[in-house]
Image: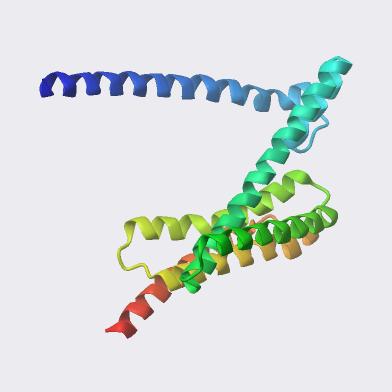
Amino acid sequence: MYKYYKKSCLFHTMHLSVAWVATLAICGFLSALPGLAIQQIFPEITAGNQFTPIFIVTYLPAVVRGLMLAGLLGLMLTSGDSYLLLLASTVTDDVVVPIKKDMDEKKKILFTRFTCVAGAVVITAMALYVNSIYQLFKTGGGAYGAGVFLPLFLGCFWKRADAKAINAGMFSGFVIAFCFDMFLKIPLGLNMDGCIIGAGVCLVICVAGSLLIRRNKR
């Protein structure tokens, strides 16, 4: 019975793997077609993020055009809501709770709501400061990645990682990446992304801080 179950699981796993690879290849090819055709359809476009709205306005009828633009804006708003909730939960669970371990669930929810409101105010100020929505998404996503990816990787695969050093690295990487993009890259037109600098600083603080804290505990 066990051998039959094992063969059945292996059979289904192989089929799912083949289906996943085929779907990835087909969807990847279809997703790449608009990008490859941008310069042929609209030679005047200088940024890839302009293709979809210009294509909708140029080739679709009025009613369908309105529905597509509304759906596009709706997708952007839902992505923004998700990022805002993700930011609030990260600040609450990964920064505040480790410092105040006696915080109950009611206070967590209250602080998360406050963080959402404060984050919305900051995002509104960013939207008034930066004219490109694409640049705002790139700045926020890059700063979040610089502060979260490497600490998450170290926390999963490095046993010497210390919570205090990881939290300091997360905060430093996020702030440095965000400030570099907002106050240096965007105004000066620099080509370097802040997430690279923020991730580097985050990695140094996480590793060096964890080793130093471990050494002092001996």
Estimate the x, y position of residue 78 in percent, counting from the top left: 68, 39
Mark count: 0
Is the C terminus in the top left, top right, bottom left or bottom right quadrant?
bottom left
Q: Would residue 185 be visible to someone looking at this image?
A: no
Question: Does residue 3 appear to the left or right of 72 in the view shown?
Answer: left
Q: How is the image coloured?
A: rainbow
Estimate the x, y position of residue 128 in percent, counting from the top left: 85, 55
Q: Against 48, is 134 above or below? A: below
Q: Against 24, is 203 above or below? A: below
Q: Against 182, is 36 above or below? A: above
Q: Quadrant of residue 36?
A: top right
Residue 30 vs residue 147, the one in the foreground: 147
Question: Does residue 112 appear to the left or right of 162 in the view shown?
Answer: right
Estimate the x, y position of residue 173 in percent, counting from the top left: 56, 65
**Residue farthest to the top?**
61
Is the N terminus in the top left, top right, bottom left or bottom right quadrant?
top left
Q: Quadrant of residue 17?
A: top left
Q: Residue at x 46, y 65 (%)?
A: 203
Estimate the x, y position of residue 167 in percent, counting from the top left: 49, 68
Q: Quadrant of residue 60?
A: top right
**Residue farthest to the right?**
62
Q: Residue at x 54, y 25 (%)?
A: 28
Q: Residue at x 85, y 21 (%)?
A: 58
Q: Would residue 149 be visible to someone looking at this image?
A: yes
Question: Does residue 209 appear to the left or right of 7 in the view shown?
Answer: right
Q: Residue at x 32, y 78 (%)?
A: 214
